[in-house]
Image: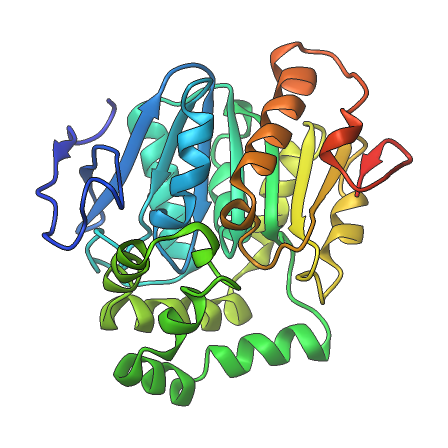
Amino acid sequence: MNETATTPITRPRWLSNRAWPYDVKTFEHNASRIAYTDTGAGRALLLVHSGTWTIIWRDLIARLAPRFRVVALDPPAMGLSDTGAGAGIVQTAAAVSALVTALDLRDLTLVLHDLGGPAGLQAARDWPGRVAGLAAVNCFGWRPAGAGFRGMLRIVGSGVLRESDVWTGWLPALSSTRYGVGRHFSRADRIAYRRGFGRRGRRSFHENMHSALHLDFSHVDEGLTAIADRPILTVFGQHNDPLHFQPRWRAVGSDVEQVVVPHGYHFPMCDAPDLVAAAITDWHGRKIASGRSAAPIGSLCLGRANGAMF
């Protein structure tokens, strides 16, 4: 490693091996202790979210780790990571960049969800030569525009909504249902998800949403521009693209494939982990591992036109 050596973490009692069946380590960064998981073997996939914690990737990791080295981290002030310098997209991007450097990840594929889109792309600005491809899972990678998009961020990132959530926990309760992460979670899994989304984490989530309104997106733009010539896969839930991010992604590069998860919502990797893992594995094998383009497998998508799955 190129930074402070990592150390194993003592699991909290509420995080059972069933809820998170992977080892967790930490490394020090900017006065924070950043928790991460590094499992499997093969070419690297880096899973990034900014606003919640790594349990959302659990079932996807189980299906990808036999073929890939899968790395996922808890953003600052979320899950098992310390608060340190604070919470927001900038802080997550810095932690992601430090982890990539610390583990010396190369030839990696970014797998980004939600606010992990801008966070991961801002981080990639520092090391575009390490990136082989991008899988965008229900996320965006550009400056929020339009009344609907900015209004949503303003409302969800507001102090009033933040403090109501901090004291009542309505967000983790709502997002742990089958319409959030909980479609294939047991009752104990849902409890663990909510415990990792405690008061500190709930405040962090809303601060992340607020930060998206004030971020200097020129760094995100630079990151996206630098890797736009790499293969891109987008994965969205059928019922969760109200702001029409998929057409925007289709215009980003010349090699974009798109998958829609039937009956999926905001967390398609939780709704249909088998389908999402198969889509990523197939796409990665054709576009990245082989070093050449090939036609997508039709069974992984609802339809196909112009070389894109959608």
Instruction: Report the front residue among 180 and 129.
Output: 180
- Residue found 18% across the figure and 46% down from its top: 16
Rendering quarter of residue 206: bottom left
Residue 204 against residue 186 in the figure, above or below: below
Residue 165 image point, x, y percent? 35, 81
Residue 234 image point, x, y percent? 67, 42
> The N terminus is located in which quarter?
top left
Residue 94 against residue 61 in the figure, above or below: below
Residue 137 image point, x, y percent? 59, 46
Instruction: Report the front residue among 307 and 107.
Output: 307
Is residue 120 visible in this depiction of the protein?
A: yes
Residue extending furthest toward the front: 186
Is residue 125 visible in this depiction of the protein?
A: no
Chosen colour scheme = rainbow
> The C terminus is located in which quarter?
top right
Instruction: Report the front residue among 279 and 129.
Output: 279
Residue extending furthest toward the bottom: 160
- Residue found 23% across the figure and 63% down from its top: 195
- Residue found 54% across the figure and 50% down from its top: 271
Number of numbered discs overlaid on the protein picture: 0
Residue 151 image point, x, y percent? 62, 81
Instruction: Report the front residue among 230 and 57.
Output: 57
- Residue found 40% across the figure and 28% down from its top: 70
